[in-house]
Structure formats: C-alpha cells, structure tokens
C-alpha cells in the first residue's frame, strides 16, 4: 500500500484506487461512492442502521472467537471498534448511498472497512494495513452480505419503530385530552359532507385518538416478525464457510447485544430471499399514514373558513398564509402531514414492487426496501411530533359556530323519527329545506309535538346516545 499526504492506495479485484488518507472506510466503499449517487442519502442518515450493522459484526466476532475462527486479539479489537460505533462514533464514515446495486454489498463492505480500520488503530496499525486485520477475512468472517445485511435491517427497523411508537402514543394522548376538553360541545356530525345527526366535538376527537392508537399495537406485532433472522445462512442460506455451531452462537450473542428476542429462521434458504415481514411492516406504516391523512383532511375541513366554511374548530396560527391576501392563515401543519402521508403510501408501493422482484435465492432490490422503510418511519415520526406540538395541543373549539350549525340543521329531524314516523319526518325536513324554517318551529307550528316533549327529544342527552325506553 502506498500513500501520499491526501490519499492512500488500496487494492481489490478490480485493481488499485486512491482513498482519502483520513477516511476510515476503504476501497470498496470508495467504489460505491463513485458508482452510486442516487438519493444523496447516506447510510449515516439513519443512525439505527449504523448501530445495527455494528451489532451484527460484534456478534459475529464473538461467535468466531468462541469457535477459534478468529484470534482473541483480533476479536477484541473488532468488538471494541463495534462498541465505539454503537456508541455513536464514526457514523459520518458510513457514506454509501442507501440505494445501490449489489443487494447491499456496498453497505456491508462500508461497515467491514470502517470496523477493520478502527480495529487496526486499536492494535497500533495504520488504516489500510489489512495484512494485520482484514475487512473480509476477519470482520466479515462467517458472513455474507446476504445474511449480515438483512439481519441488520431487521434490527434497524425495530429500533426505528420505538421512537415512532412513542410519538404516536403522545399524539393519541393529546387527542384524548382534546376529547375530554370538548366533551360538552354539541355539533352536527356529517356523512358524505352532508348534515347527519348530532354528536359532540369531544366524540370526534376521541374517535381520532382511538383510530390512530390502534396502530401502536400493530407496529408491535409487525416488529415481532422481524425478530426471526437469517444470520448464519451466509450466501444463500446453506451456511457455507461457517462452523456448525456458529449460527446459534451468533444469533444468541446478537440478541444479547441488541436487547431484542432474536431467533434463527426455521429455514435459512427461505429466509434469505423472503421479504414478507418487510412488506407487512410497510403495510402497517401505510395503514397509519392513511388514517393520519384522513384525520388531517378532517381538521382542515372543520377549521375551514374562518367565516365562509365550517369553522367549528380554530387551529393555532403558525404563519401568514398569503403574499397577496392580508390576514389569511392557512392550515399549514395538517397540509404538511397530508403530504407526508402521501409519500409513505407511495413508499409502500415501492417496497411491494421491490419485494416481488426477488429472484431465486436472493432479493437484489432489498436496498430500496431499507431506504423506504427507514425513511417512512423517520418522516412519520417527525410529522406526528409536529402535528401534536404545533397543531393539536393548540386547537380551540368555536362553540358558537357549532351551536349555529346545530340549530340550523335539518339533520336533527332524525331524533324525531321514532315519534313522528319516517314519512312525516321526511315531509318536515323537506319543508324546512324549502322554506328556510327550522325543524323545531315547523313541528311546533303543526302541533305534532308539544314544546316540552320536543325539548326532551332534541336535548343533547337524547340525541347523543341510545334512547333506551324513553321513546
């Protein structure tokens, strides 16, 4: 190996290539940097993935040490390097674009080379002096990209799911609080954008909370499927180039290091090509995005106006809404969340297509799956936190507007159907619509019910829950 002030020369099967002298990565990472410039998003953008890669490499080193496949001094150096990366050091050296050819080989080699060079420094050697400790022969011993990479992905997705679950929990709690706060604000419910029957604004927000909260458990369930890993399967699941006891040892060590209840897949050949767990997890993210987007659609409708729309809630003003219309304030936070939802829904399609594109014993499109899963979770986490802090917590009820809509609505006639009959109630509704009179005035005018009974039937208590024996 030769070097000058700015570079060092490394060698691989394609020949020599200069690598920045101060880089902790090596030649194969450099080739990937030269080849792949797709998203501009490097591995380091997702710290959970970097940590997961280091955990896999540490577990492998520990298993190889126990089996005599790696000398103790090399194993300790590799383990120490992995510990540093797990702790957050040198993440900026994980530079390869998430989207890459080679089924993740460039990502795996980026990890191997950084860990090897960091381990070399711990042994008192210079970067690139791989005859002392090699990225492939030592850091990657008993592994292939095809088992190390997907195992790291399984871990990374689980790690990334934890903060997402927390922000969803926080958002649900804020919605529940609003539900309690608005429990006495009676308003009209709507179906197909038409007046339906009365409800409370609190019920509306409670429904939002339940709807979003359901997916916390769904994320838990999907995460559990990612605890089955193919580490030890090496190239295609046959375990070539491993000790018979390596697989169990490596997986047990990885479970201990990661704190996740990992187990070996029952069939490593199947597990090496199957992306089903990732497809399911992506589907959960899509499901949540759909619900989140629908709720933001509702928030925008409920706050529309403020004087010529529904105007039943008041969103906290975040910024001026127009460069030409004075006083205009837009629902910018729900709008941004809607766009996040659309992106996550689109990402699910990309995951689905990439999973279907697998051929024979491997899926070469797994990097696209990784990018979309991690990016979707990052976006959803940020969107939920933003929505919670900058919108939901500051929403106020426009109680006067809710009351006006309720009083002017024809929908309250539904509460009178058991007493008036459907045909008679329909006639009153049509007459109210055509004349502009209220349902209450017409019923009293025609003497269909007395004022006391009408007040009882149209009271919030009677209209907001089953009537029991009162009808």
Image (cartoon, rainbow, N blue to C red):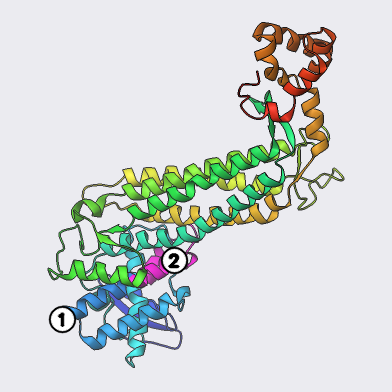
Quadrant hosting residue 21 = bottom left
Give the image quarter of residue 420: top right
Task: Report crowding for label 1: few under 14, some 14 to 19, many 20 or more residues within 10 A (C-alpha).
Answer: few
The C terminus lies in which quarter of the figure? top right
Q: Which circle marks residue 68 in the picture?
A: 1
For the question of whether residue 438 can be seen, the reply is: no
Mark 1 lies on a secondary structure that is loop
Q: How many marks do you count on the picture?
A: 2
Question: Which residues are drawn in magenta?
Answer: 29-55
* Among numbered discs 1 and 2, the one appearing first in the sequence: 2
Left or right of 86, for residue 356: left
Q: Is residue 54 magenta?
A: yes
Magenta stretch, overall SS = helix
| Position in image of residue 424 (x %, y %) | 70, 6
Q: Nearer the viewer, residue 289 or 7?
A: 289
Q: Residue at x 30, y 69 (%)?
A: 254
**Residue denoted by label 2:** 48
Residue toward you, 359 or 335: 335
Residue at far bottom of view: 124
- Vertical comparison of 305 with 344: above or below: above
Q: Nearer the viewer, residue 4 or 414?
A: 414
Residue appearing at x 30%, y 53% in the figure: 364
The answer to whether residue 221 is left or right of residue 285 is left
Q: Residue 295 lies in magenta, yes or no? A: no
Name the residue nearer the viewer: 31 or 88. Answer: 88
């Amino acid at each position: 190996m030769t070097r000058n002030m700015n570079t060092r020369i490394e060698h691989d099967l394609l020949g020599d290539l200069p690598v920045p002298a101060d880089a902790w990565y090596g030649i194969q990472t450099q080739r990937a940097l030269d080849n792949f410039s797709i998203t501009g998003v490097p591995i380091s953008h997702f710290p959970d993935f970097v940590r997961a890669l280091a955990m896999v490499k540490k577990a492998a080193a520990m298993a190889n040490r126990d089996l005599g496949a790696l000398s103790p001094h090399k194993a300790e150096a590799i383990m120490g390097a992995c510990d540093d990366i797990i702790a957050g050091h040198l993440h900026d050296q994980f530079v390869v674009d998430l989207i890459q050819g080679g089924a993740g080989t460039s990502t795996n080699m980026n990890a191997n080379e950084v860990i090897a060079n960091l381990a070399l420094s711990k042994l008192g050697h210079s970067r690139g002096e791989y005859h002392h400790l090699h990225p492939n022969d030592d850091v990657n011993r008993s592994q292939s990209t095809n088992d190390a990479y997907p195992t790291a992905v399984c871990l990374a997705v689980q790690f990334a799911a934890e903060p997402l679950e927390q922000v969803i929990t926080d958002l649900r709690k804020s919605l529940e609080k609003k539900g309690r706060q608005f429990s006495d604000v009676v308003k009209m419910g709507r179906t197909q954008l038409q007046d339906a029957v009365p409800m409370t604004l609190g019920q509306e927000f409670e429904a939002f909370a339940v709807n979003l909260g359901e997916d916390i458990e769904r994320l838990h369930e999907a995460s559990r499927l990612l605890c089955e890993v193919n580490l030890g399967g090496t190239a295609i699941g046959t375990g070539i180039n491993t000790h018979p006891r390596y697989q169990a040892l490596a997986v047990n060590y990885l479970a201990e290091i990661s704190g996740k209840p990992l187990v070996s897949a029952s069939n490593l050949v199947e597990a090496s090509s199957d992306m089903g767990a990732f497809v399911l997890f992506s589907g959960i993210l899509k499901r949540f995005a759909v619900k989140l987007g629908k709720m933001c659609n509702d928030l925008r409708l409920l706050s529309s106006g403020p004087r010529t729309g529904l105007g039943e809630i008041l969103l906290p003003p975040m910024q001026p809404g127009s460069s030409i219309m004075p006083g205009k304030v837009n629902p910018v936070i729900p709008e941004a969340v809607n766009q996040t939802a659309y992106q996550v829904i689109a990402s699910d399609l990309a995951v689905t297509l990439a999973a279907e594109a697998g051929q024979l014993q491997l899926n070469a499109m797994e990097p696209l799956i990784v990018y979309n899963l991690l990016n979707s979770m990052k976006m959803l986490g940020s969107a939920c936190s933003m929505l919670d802090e900058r919108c939901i917590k500051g929403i106020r009820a426009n109680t006067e507007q809710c009351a006006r809509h309720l009083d002017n609505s024809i929908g309250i006639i539904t509460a009178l159907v058991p007493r008036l009959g459907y045909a008679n109630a329909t006639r009153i509704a049509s007459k109210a619509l055509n004349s502009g009179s209220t349902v209450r005035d017409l019923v009293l005018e025609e003497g269909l019910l007395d004022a006391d009974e009408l007040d009882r039937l149209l009271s919030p208590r009677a209209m907001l829950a089953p009537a029991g024996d009162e009808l």
